[in-house]
Amino acid sequence: MTAQSRVATGGLSYADIVDLADNAPLVAHVRIRNIITLKPEQAGDVPAGYRRLFIEGDVTGLIRGDAGIAPLVSWLYDAPINARGKLPKLKKAQVILFARPGSRPGQIQLVARDAQIPATPAEIDRVKGILSALVARDAPPRILGLGDAFHVAGTVAGEGETQIFLRTEKGDPVSLSILRRPGEPPRWAVALGEIVDEAARPPVPGSLLWYRLACALPPALPARAVRTLSVQDAEAARADYRVVIDALGPCGRTRTPG
């Protein structure tokens, strides 16, 4: 699966699913039992092109949720309507819900308008894999931005090394290193630790570490990151950072997080 691949039934990229899973304390596989279309005066503020539904469903599997879940749950869902004003056929549909517990037992709240997706076998496997990566002991931290960059020129033309430190949510050390040798393409790696060793490698496309970098890093090295460098070293660091950004490629996010 490539980093920007889609599942046809859900239409969401890898990054989209991680966005949802990363913010959902509750993820469940549910079979829809009952649907009630709310009247405008009941629905509240609903965007154009959607109708708000009250849905009840039977939980067929709890994918994530430390506190458990009721066997029958209810939630509100803003369903998109088609050009003819028709709602999608959801009765008896199998869906995956990314949610948080509601105020009453059995009530849940979706973490986003599009946090209900079709529960195909492939999508269930993908969601489980993403959640496993998120809770793994060695899971990469959330990236907040860039810290300082350093560059050391080599003894011959075309030789040099750049190291760029990243700011993380909990202060975990993460850095990028880019190495240039004459006559060779530049090599880069990401290190999750204080020391950059030979084991450091670029992230696998479509992995959680790739997502953390591709979806969080700015497109260019800001001035504050190279403020202590000479003009020549700053230009080299910017060029080396561009190597990383080009190698990561686009994040592939198709939705607005939140």
Image (cartoon, rainbow, N blue to C red):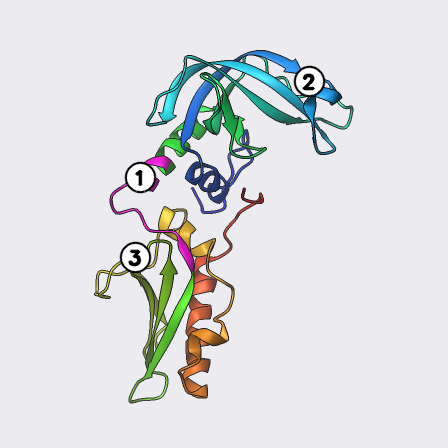
* Residue holding disc 3: 172
Indicate the position of residue 115 as horizontal and vertical percent values.
53, 31
- Say above or below: 39 vs 142: above
What segment is highlighted magenta in the picture? 131-144
Q: Quadrant of residue 145?
A: bottom left
Quadrant in which the C terminus appears = top right
State the separation of the CA atoms marked 3 and 2: 46 Å
Q: Are marks 1 and 3 in contact (CB under 8 Å)?
A: no
Q: Are marks 1 and 2 in contact (CB under 8 Å)?
A: no
- Say above or below: 165 vs 258: below
Q: Nearer the viewer, mark 1 or mark 2?
A: 2
**Residue 135 in magenta?**
yes
Point out which mark residue 38 bears. Answer: 2
Query: What's the residue type where badge 1 is placed?
Result: Val
* Residue holding disc 1: 135
Query: What's the residue type where badge 2 is placed?
Result: Leu
48 to the left or right of 2: right
Q: Is disc 3 surrounded by few (<14), some (14 to 19) or many (20+) residues within 10 Å? A: some
State the separation of the CA atoms marked 1 and 3: 16 Å
Q: Is disc 2 surrounded by few (<14), some (14 to 19) or many (20+) residues within 10 Å? A: some
